[in-house]
Image (cartoon, helix red, strand yellow):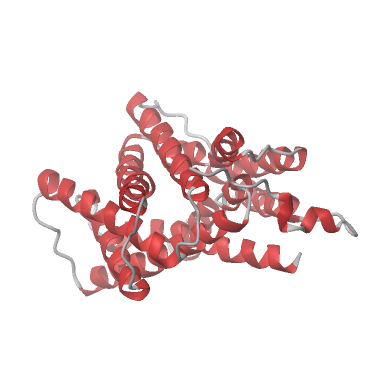
Amino acid sequence: METTWRTVAITAVAPIAWGATYVVTRHLLPADAPLWGAALRALPAGLLLWALARRRPVGSWWWRAPLLGLLNFGAFFALVYISAQSLPSSIASSMMALSPLALAGLAWPLLAQRPSLRWALACAVGILGVLLVVGWSAGAVAPLGIMASALALLVSSLGAILTTRWRDDTPLLAMTAWQLTAGGVALVLVAAVMEGRPPRVDAAGVAAYVAIAVVATALAFVCWFTGLRHLPAGTVGLIGLLNPVTGIALGVLVGGESLTLAQALGMALVLAAIAIINVRRRGSTRASAPAQKPPVPAA
C-alpha cells in the first residue's frame, strides 16, 4: 500500500510539471517558434540524462529508442502545438483528458491489462472533473485541430504502451535519455527547415527554457516512465489528469485568472478519481501485491 502510493506520488510529478509549463510558456517564451521551443525542450533534457546515465543503446534499443522518441516527444510535441493553435484550450484539454481511456484501451490487447470496474468508475469521475475544470467553448471547432488532438492522444498513448511493453533491465535513466535525444534531434531538423534560426530570448527566457528542459522534461519523464514500469497503464493515465488541473491552478495563482466553483469541484473530482483507483480493500493482500499486474509479453 505504502509502496503504491509512493509510486503514484512519483508519477504525479510528471503531469504537475507539464501543467506548470502552460504558464511558463505563455509568459516567458516566444509564441512564434513552437518547433524550436519543443526542440530546445527535448534535446537538452536528453543530453543531460545521457551524461548522467553514461550508457549507449545496445541491441534492439538502437531502433526502439528513435521510434519511442518520435512517438513520445517528436510527433507528440508537434501535434500538440497544432491542436493548441487550432482549438480553444478547453476543447484541446478535454481531448487529452481522454488519455485514461486510450491508455487502458491499448493496454488491454497489447499488455493484457484488462480494465476493472473500479478503473471505469475512477475514469468517469476523473474525466467529469476535467470537463468541469476546462469548461466548454461555444465557438466553431476546426476539424484540423480535432484531428491533431486525436493523433496526439494516439501517438502518446501508443508510445506509453510500447514503453511498458518493451521494458527490460535497461536502466530507466538511460532509456529516457535515448528517447529524448532521438526526439530532440528530429525536432531540431524540422525546426531548422520550418522556422529557420532559433529564437532570441532574454535572461528570463533562457531560465524558462532551462526549467522546462530540466524539470518539466528530464525529471518529469523519468517520473512518468517510473509509473509506467510499476503501475497499470490505465492508472497512469488517470494520474495524468493532474496536468490540466495544475494548469488552471497556476493560472489562478500566478496569472491572475479566475477560478469558478465548477472548476474547484472539478479539481476535487480529479483527486478523488486518483484516490479511487489506488484505494485497496482493507485486509486484501492480493489486491496490493505487485503480482496482480499481468506479465508483459515479450516483444
Report whether 64 appears left or right of 164: left
Q: Nearer the viewer, residue 6 or 203?
A: 6
Q: Nearer the viewer, residue 230 or 17?
A: 230
Q: Nearer the viewer, residue 170 or 229?
A: 170
Q: Is residue 136 above or below residue 77?
A: above
Q: Is residue 234 above or below residue 142?
A: below
Corner quadrant of residue 128: top right
The answer to whether residue 258 shows anywhere in this view is no
Residue drawn at x 44%, y 60% as measured from the top left? 221
The percent position of residue 6, horizontal first and vertical second, equals 65, 68
The percent position of residue 203, horizontal first and vertical second, equals 22, 74
Q: Is residue 138 above or below residue 8?
A: above
Q: How many marks?
A: 0
Report whether 197 appears left or right of 59: left
Corner quadrant of residue 281: bottom right
Q: Residue furthest right?
A: 283
The percent position of residue 162, horizontal first and vertical second, equals 47, 44
The percent position of residue 114, horizontal first and vertical second, equals 68, 37
Report whether 250 appears left or right of 25: right
Report whether 149 appears left or right of 279: left
Residue drawn at x 34%, y 69% as measured from the top left? 55
For the N terminus, the image quarter is: bottom right
The answer to whether residue 238 shows anywhere in this view is yes
